[in-house]
Image: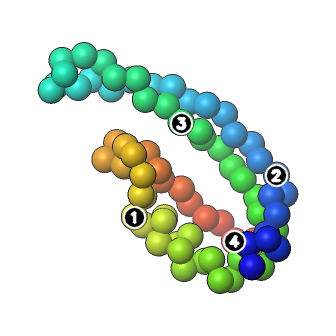
């Protein structure tokens, strides 16, 4: 099913930022992609998983707001 989904458009940029670690008493470099991606195809099977990711924000740095995304359906 995933083979039928294609990337239509991407607009990504890298975003660097630092946070202070009290435990390590130093600034820690963080960074990741920020932007938009548009897919075309039948996403119906994957929508529950994508919606779950909107709520759970899984991945490294989620306590700092990383891994967050929002899905817009047109």
Label 2: how many residues lie within 10 Å, few (<14), some (14-19) or many (20+)?
few
| Above or below, 11 relative to 26 | below
Which residue appears at 69% of the width and 40% of the height? 12
Pointer 4: what residue?
Answer: 73
- Give the Cα distance between marks 2 and 3: 19 Å
Horizontal side of residue 60 vs 48, given as left or right: left
User: Which numbered disc covers residue 9?
Assistant: 2
- Give the Cα distance between marks 4 and 2: 15 Å
- Give the Cα distance between marks 1 and 3: 18 Å
Q: Which of marks 4 and 2 is in front?
A: 2
Is label 4 in a helix, a strand or a loop? loop
Pointer 1: what residue?
Answer: 56
* Quarter of the figure that contains the N terminus: bottom right
Q: Earlier in the sequence, mark 4 or mark 3?
A: 3
Is label 1 in a helix, a strand or a loop? helix
- Give the Cα distance between marks 4 and 3: 24 Å
Is label 3 in a helix, a strand or a loop? strand
Is label 2 in a helix, a strand or a loop? strand
Can residue 65 be seen here? The reply is no
């Amino acid at each position: 099913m995933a083979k039928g989904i294609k990337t239509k458009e991407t607009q990504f940029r890298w975003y660097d930022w630092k946070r202070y670690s009290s435990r390590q008493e130093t600034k820690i470099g963080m960074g990741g992609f920020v932007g938009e991606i548009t897919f075309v195809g039948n996403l119906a099977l994957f929508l529950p998983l994508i919606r779950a990711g909107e709520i759970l924000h899984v991945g490294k740095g989620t306590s700092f707001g990383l891994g967050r995304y929002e899905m817009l359906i047109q």
